[in-house]
Amino acid sequence: MSRVKDKDLLLVGSMPFDTAEQTFRWACDGGLAPALPCLPDGEVGERSYWIIMLGYRVYHGHPEIETLRRPNAVDGVENWKPSGRQDNWSFKVKPGVTAVRFGDPGWRLGYARDAINSYFIFRTLRDQGVIPRGLRFQVCLPLTYSAFGSMFPDRQDWPLIVPGLEAAMQAELASILAHIPAADLAIQWDCAVEVALTEQAFGWTTDTPMPELVAPTVAALAPRIPADVMLGYHLCFGTLGGWPMHRPKSLSSCVALARVMLEASRRTVDYIHMPVLDGADDSYFAPLKSFRAPDTKIYLGVIHHMDDRAEFTRMVSAAARSIADFGIAAPCGFGREPRPAAGLLKEHVDAMAALRALRT
């Protein structure tokens, strides 16, 4: 039986807060916790710009990597946060390098350190009764190509980076698992570049077919996560410069990618999140009709434009004609598009109330 069957709300990860404690209290004090399978720390601090922290902290200055471009200064002061794709970090592997490797295994990428620190806050608030028992701590990690692909424009560099980056992420996973109990943990792989490659968005193409490209990276990571740990995938259309960065006509590519991930994970996948564009109709959701994964819950990113309750109801109703059981979420995170906390909470509460009304 699915571990998330009765949990109808997912927080994708990134939230407009400065600290993990703010995120935890916002969700729990706001009444969202009973509907959630797991609770992220909001990807606060350096992770607020998702994988960009890897650009300035890991790739920039690496002896085997050359920096081609960095984000423009702001008012004459150096800056690591890009304003859009045209202003993003850009790198290439230096000539003669046959494999890029990363030192300090288990800690170099920074994800294990942040997860362990946030889990201490999570556990403390749980002991205080703020976070209910049974709610898991959610750690969001970029899948391999999402961790670097948007910053390395030369596809010939990719095979030189993937093995070392996978080894570094495997070590981060090991550190996380060594310090956070499996029964308390949910791992979510964030997949934006993988979706863009599947869609061939931005003109991105590779000589390797999508399944052959993505499946090995999933197989290198997901099976290392013990069965007692919850596992999910967040498929993403991107937010750098504003969401969405591309607008597919349907969820067909997301469904195709999900099938690859389910097979390559070689273990139960508890949930998959798929983004939903404004104005999505029956044809947008139609690919879900052929999706069969009874142990995997689909969360649809329909929580947006909540000032139009009728439009939300229309989209959810359209989705229900293609998939019988699903949960809801925002289409992406909010770290790069800060929103007032009270308004964001109201959107989620209103969306849950509208979903319940439709199902009664």
Image (cartoon, grey):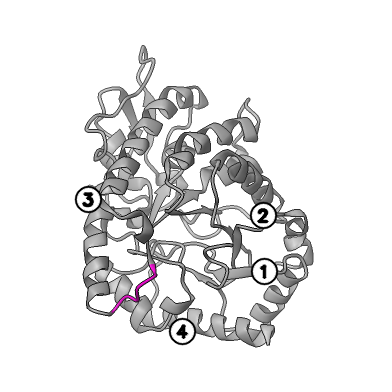
Of mark 3 and mark 1, the one earlier in the sequence is 3
Q: Is residue 246 left or right of residue 105?
A: right
* Image coordinates for residue 84, horizontal then vertical, percent: 44, 51
Residue for point 32% across, 26% down: 66
Q: CA distance from mark 1 to mark 2?
A: 11 Å
Residue for point 68% across, 46% down: 256
Q: CA distance from mark 3 to mark 1?
A: 52 Å
Q: Nearer the viewer, mark 2 or mark 3?
A: 2
Q: CA distance from mark 4 to mark 2?
A: 32 Å
Q: Amino acid at mark 3?
A: Gly
Q: CA distance from mark 1 to mark 4?
A: 24 Å
Q: Nearer the viewer, mark 4 or mark 2?
A: 2
Q: Amino acid at mark 2?
A: Ala
* Image coordinates for residue 156, horizontal then vertical, percent: 50, 22
Of mark 1 and mark 4, the one earlier in the sequence is 1
Q: Which residue is mark 3?
A: 76
Q: Amino acid at mark 4?
A: Lys
